[in-house]
Amino acid sequence: MKIIQVNTHLLSAKLTTPFAYSRAWYDTRTAMLVEIVTDEGHTGWGECYGPAKMTKAIVDEFAALLIGRDPLNTDYLWQQLYARFRDHGQKGLLIQALSGVDIALWDIRGKHFNVPAYQLLGGALRSEVQAYATGLYRRDSGDPLSYLTGEAENYVAEGFRAIKLKVGFGIAQDRAVTQAIRNAIGEDIALMIDANHAYDAVSAIRLGREVEALDISWFEEPVPPEDLQGYQAVKAALTIPLAGGECEFTRMGFRDVLTQRAMDIIQPDICSAGGLSECKKISDMALAFGIRTNPHVWGSGIGIAASLQWIAMVPDHTPVSLTPSAPLLEFDRTEHPIRQAILQQPIEHKNGVVTIPQGPGLGIDINRDALSFFKV
Ligand SMILES: [Mg+2]
């Protein structure tokens, strides 16, 4: 089997209501999808996280190195692309582009052998996964204490047992909002907070101490991703588990996180950290360090489907135990017109639980009408 085409699809959709996290406002959602076509009729789909126009340019550059190659040689092709561009990008956009390619190759491999991708990497540990609601962003009008508590109550009513709140808007507002959400959802729903690296270690410790009594399941990206010593300082000062890693890349990047024990929970993103090949290696490495893996997910249905193939194999946090504690699926609830539209069968939750697709490859079929509709 040979690769005969590498196509990139740049999609964009305007949002009805802009929303903000601690770094920026969003008024548009974009997606950069990779389609790899083979001479045996199999087509594989992948997705790249990050600035879509930039990852598109890189994948278009990769194409010449992929055409004519055997798509089943996933590790070989990963190493070749990585080595060819290593001098210019061991982290960031290069690896995000490589991630989309790797995911598409796994989709092809699954379709070729007519099994889900996870079946070819050791098989599934689970057939469904508890999802947590990612939302609770800021809006351009209204009182966050009121609209955020209303939104949180809706997630609980939908059946979610865990929700994540965006913080990083100043310690006073973060503390007030976290307290209000905890009051609104009660004690039985898990609550995580995510600062998107808005703070330095001093401020992150201060915020952590202010909310420590509110039973926070994890504090995500308290400090910038480069500052592993900052992570260690925050970790030493707080009893809240620290999470991070959506801005980290490849097994080489996570090697440093793990050997320094900078985080309690690592959150690689399959569309960013190197694809399914690399993320399986990263979660296996984390298991050896006794550190939890809980993937970051922020993309279209292709990113969600690829994440589910991986999550099917991510070990429980209490490995081979009578009381397993499984990883959660991050389920983005913000407006994203492209997310489910590009799938023939949307991936939805039922009472906060998502079933892992069982079809070949990523287990999804693409709606090409939606690709044309959102095409830039
Ligand atoms: Mg995050």
Image: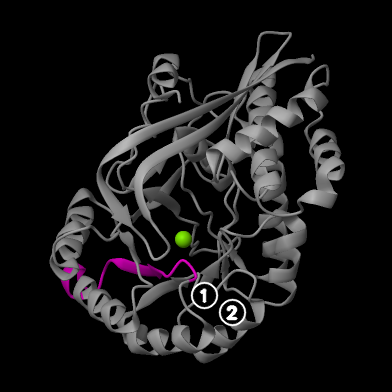
**Viewer-proximal residue, 255 or 28?**
28
How far apart marks 1 and 2 lie (CA) works out to 8 Å
Q: What residue type is labelled 1?
A: Leu
Q: In which quarter of the image is the N terminus?
A: top right
- Looking at the image, residue 122 lies above or below residue 196: above
- Tell me, yes or no, if residue 130 can be seen here: yes
- Tell me, yes or no, if residue 239 can be seen here: no
* Quarter of the image where one finds residue 248: bottom right
Q: Which amino acid does label 2 sit on?
A: Tyr
Do residues under tags 1 and 2 come within 8 Å of each other at their CB atoms? yes
Mark nearer the N terminus (1 vs 2): 2
Q: In this view, does 230 lie to the left or right of 61?
A: left
Q: Which mark is residue 231?
A: 2
Residue 365: x percent and y percent? 48, 20
**Viewer-proximal residue, 327 or 171?**
171
Local SS, label 1: strand
Local SS, label 2: helix
Residue 141: x percent and y percent? 16, 59
Crowd rating for badge 2 (residues with CA inside 10 Å; few <14, some 14–19, many 20+): many
Residue 174: x percent and y percent? 30, 77
* Model colouring: one colour
- Bounds of the magenta span? 183-197
